Amino acid sequence: MTEMAKGKVYLVGAGPGDPELLTVKAQRLIARAAVILHDDLVPPAILALAAPQAEVASVGKRYGAKGASQPEINARMIESARRGLEVVRLKGGDPGIFGRLAEEIDALETAGVPFEVVPGITAGIAAAASLGVSLTDRRKAARVVVVTNHQAPSEQGSQSTDWHGLIRDDSTLVIYMPGHDFANLRDELLAAGCAPDMPAAIVSRASAPDQRYCFTIVGELAKLPRMDSPAVLLIGRSLDRAHRRSSAEAALALDEADLILSSP
Ligand code: SAH
């Protein structure tokens, strides 16, 4: 028989980075948790909301750094809950989007530990908001496809994403972990039938003070400047208006620069 757990694990989304984009529930749980196990994507300003006596530990493993393994994270959550503690497992964005939530739920269920999932604002949603873009549009975008350009080798045999059927003229594609090889991505998207003039935008560090973005079209993806991680790539006709707005602003900035240069 599994040991009865007294504590509880909250699998909490921390949002894209801006502490103001935390849910009220996440904020409350962070403030009262005895143990916080967080990913690297969670910024210090959010961890600062923890109680002074809380045990706050990074279990992130980004950029190939040696962090805790998934079994180690699971064991730590279970062990703390069995000591009767409230544990917050804090993940960037929403825990259910490319966050290995399913594996953690499996482990908690198998161990008989009570848990609750608390959603967060995922990076793609935050990126669209910061560009002033609606991911669906009754006129142009009937669906949103959330996808990654990176497959964990252990799970998927490291094959690349199959874009056929994903890239359609009436879809907005939100690509997590887009990598940096945009020449290859452009070739794959075009081979899957994407129009070369399809608008695209990359948003780096969405919602953070140093957020940056850049618009382009799929045919010119390879010309995108290299942006800091984390970044998401948005692709679709729903970006049309924002793309035009951004080009107009850039042209205006150029005109102003000309004026300054040409003034005596
Ligand atoms: N659970 C997270 C995603 C984890 S996968 C979420 O819902 O947002 C990690 C990837 O998320 C990064 O490689 C990047 O593609 C994206 N990402 C996370 N935070 C981001 C941010 N603030 N701005 C842009 N992309 C971000």
Image (cartoon, rainbow, N blue to C red):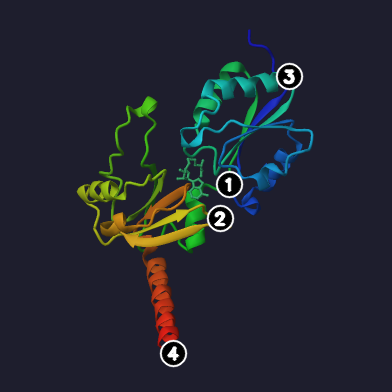
Q: Which residue is the site of mark 2?
A: 207
Q: CA distance from mark 2 to mark 4?
A: 37 Å
Callout 1, which amino acid? Gly
Q: Residue furthest top?
A: 1
Residue that appears at 36% across and 65% down:
240
Q: CA distance from mark 2 to mark 3?
A: 36 Å
- Classify mark 4: residues with Cα within 10 Å, few (<14), some (14-19) or many (20+): few
Callout 4, which amino acid? Ser
Query: Is 125 left or right of 233, judged from the image as shown?
Result: right
Circle 2/circle 4 CB separation < 8 Å: no
Q: Is residue 5 visible?
A: yes
Q: Which residue is the site of mark 3?
A: 83
Q: Residue furthest right?
A: 53
Q: Mark number for residue 263?
A: 4
Where residue 122 appears, as percent x and y from the top left, is: 52, 47
Callout 3, which amino acid? Arg
In the foreground, 261 or 229: 261
Asked where in the image residue 196 lies, by quadrant, the reply is: bottom left
Q: Which residue is the site of mark 1?
A: 15
In the foreground, 12 or 73: 73
- Classify mark 3: residues with Cα within 10 Å, few (<14), some (14-19) or many (20+): few
Which circle's residue, 3 or 1, is located before the other in the chain? 1
